[in-house]
Image: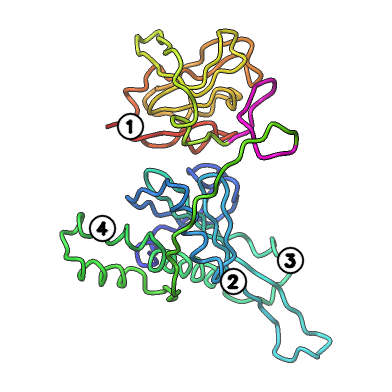
Amino acid sequence: MSLLLKDRVYSMEAPTAKRGVFPLHGFKLGLYRLPLKLDEVLEIQSVHDGLKNTFEMDTYADRIFATYSWTEENMSNRTSKDHEKIDLSVTVEIVTGEVVDIIYQIFPIEKFGDAPWVSDYKKKADHFAKMITDTILRNTILADKMVEALIKSEKLTEDQALLRLEEITPLAQIVPDAKPIPVKKQEVALDVAGGPAQEWQGGDVKPGPIDIEYKSKMKASPSFKAPSGHEIKTWGRVGSDNGIMGVWGEYVSVDYDICVADGACIDACPVGVYAFADFPGNPGSDKKPLMGGEPDCIFCLACEGVCPPEAIKIFAQD
């Protein structure tokens, strides 16, 4: 999307002002939101595996990271005593979900070392970041999703959509076989210490992020009537002592056992979906942001992006 990104590079003052910025705190940011759905575990794995021989690839929670590295030298004579070199890199972050955010940040060169002799560092980093973005969108399964989106949004034929995709990704490298079909791994539950991860049993703060497949992994539990009158659905709730609260909310979903009640979601929500309510006895916190205004959610994803322990997942309402 290098052509579409050219006017979307700007300076950031607050390190977590945009969804997806954490933990890549930086100064210059390129951001583009695509109307594509990418939330299946196997699809995310396919994007990762398809480019693992082209870029340094990594995944964390609902994010995919692609890093390109290059080396700058102050002279071509490597045997000279004055010869210096510095290793530089830029990372593109893909935040998956109901929509796809593609983000990159250009750090000050001082992050990599003292090299005042490097010329056009920011220009090169910007170019390489856009090259990564274009390569991802031209070669992986996101290419198929882009073509489908272009057919619908611009009323194009499939051939026209393919040409349009080529036009808006001019910096793309061609990567053969970048759409692997990953094999779903069998999960084995063991009852011995040190075995594969077991279902959380309470007793301490549950580590994040929220499992976005909780509806299929947790049993539905009794609903809770908010002061607003809204019936909040819950999953995985055990007893009434708040020791294990599970996930609350069908569309505005919060894992209350991960939640530490810092209030960032309340401050970020533009329509007042949340309000604190007391739930003493939970290891994470004695109060929780109750989603009494869940029907009013506008799917801006602000709360999801600012939650420090990543306890929130927002789903589009039917």
Which amino acid type corresponds to the residue marked 2 in the rendered image?
Tyr
Which amino acid type corresponds to the residue marked 3 in the rendered image?
Gly
Which amino acid type corresponds to the residue marked 4 in the rendered image?
Glu
User: Closest to the observer: 153 or 158?
Assistant: 158
Residue drawn at x 51%, y 12% is: 277
Q: What residue does disc 4 label?
A: 148
Earlier-in-chain disc, 1 versus 3: 3
Left/right placement of residue 88 relative to residue 175 reads right
Q: Is residue 93 above or below residue 198?
A: below
Real-space CA distance between mark 1 and mark 4, rounded to the nearest whole angstrom: 25 Å
Crowd rating for badge 4 (residues with CA inside 10 Å; few <14, some 14–19, many 20+): some
Q: Pinpoint residue 55: horizontal percent, then vertical percent.
A: 56, 68
Q: Which mark is residue 298?
A: 1
Real-space CA distance between mark 1 and mark 2, rounded to the nearest whole angstrom: 40 Å
Earlier-in-chain disc, 4 versus 3: 3
Earlier-in-chain disc, 3 versus 2: 3
Which type of secondary structure does the marked residue at label 1 adopt? loop
User: Marks 1 and 2: which is nearer the front?
Assistant: 1
User: Closest to the observer: 76 or 204?
Assistant: 204
Real-space CA distance between mark 1 and mark 3, rounded to the nearest whole angstrom: 44 Å
Magenta span = 194-208
Q: What residue does disc 2 label?
A: 121
Residue 197 in the magenta stretch? The answer is yes
Q: Main secondary structure of the magenta part?
A: loop
Earlier-in-chain disc, 1 versus 2: 2
Left/right placement of residue 313 relative to residue 27 reads left
Q: What residue does disc 3 label?
A: 113
Real-space CA distance between mark 4 and mark 2, rounded to the nearest whole angstrom: 36 Å
Crowd rating for badge 3 (residues with CA inside 10 Å; few <14, some 14–19, many 20+): few
Q: Pinpoint residue 151: horizontal percent, then vertical percent.
A: 20, 59
